[in-house]
Image (cartoon, grey):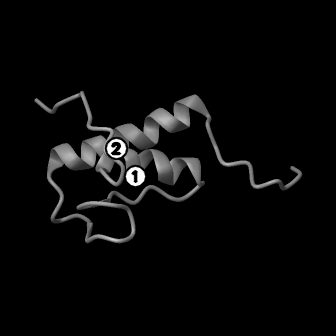
Amino acid sequence: MLNTSYSERHGGPHDRGGADSYYGRARDPHYYTGASYSTRRVTPPEMTAEEIAAYNAGYDANEADRNFKDWGVAE
């Protein structure tokens, strides 16, 4: 059974999933070993099933909240 309590560490899988959704990016499971963009980026197949689930949970939670970046563009 996968863990359903995810670390909120900045740069971690759950954080990166939420950030990708927030910025309107496509789903692309990954995380950083430390700070985002300045440490090694980990992607499948290096990610565990639990890490991929955490990424997807972060992405899905933000999608459900409909908390998206306002780019200031009229619709």
Asked if residue 1 is positioned above or below residue 58 in the image, the reply reads above
Mark 2 element type: helix
* Left or right position of 75 against 12: right
Name of the residue lying farthest toward the right? 74
Q: Which mark is residue 16?
A: 1
Identify residue for label 2: 14
Q: Amino acid at mark 1?
A: Arg
Name of the residue lying farthest toward the left? 1
Q: Residue at x 60, y 54 (%)?
A: 24
* Left or right position of 57 against 18: left
- Horizontal and vertical percent for residue 49? 16, 47
Decide: marks 2, 1 in contact (CB < 8 A)? yes
Q: Amino acid at mark 2?
A: His
Number of residue marks: 2
Mark 1 element type: helix
Q: What is the spatial separation of the Cα atoms under label 2 and label 1, in whole angstroms? A: 6 Å
Residue 17 or residue 40, whichever sits in front:
40
* Left or right position of 66 against 28: right
Q: Residue at x 39, y 69 (%)?
A: 37
- Horizontal and vertical percent for residue 72? 82, 53
**Circle 2 crowding by C-alpha within 10 Å: few under 14, some 14–19, many from 20:** many
- Horizontal and vertical percent for residue 70? 73, 48
Which of the 4 image quarters holds residue 57? top left
Asked if residue 68 is positioned above or below residue 26 in the image, the reply reads above
* Left or right position of 3 against 43: left
- Horizontal and vertical percent for residue 39? 29, 70
Point out the image quarter for the N terminus: top left
Q: Residue at x 30, y 50 (%)?
A: 12
Q: Residue at x 26, y 65 (%)?
A: 43
Q: Which mark is residue 34?
A: none
Asked if residue 28 is positioned above or below residue 54 in the image, the reply reads below
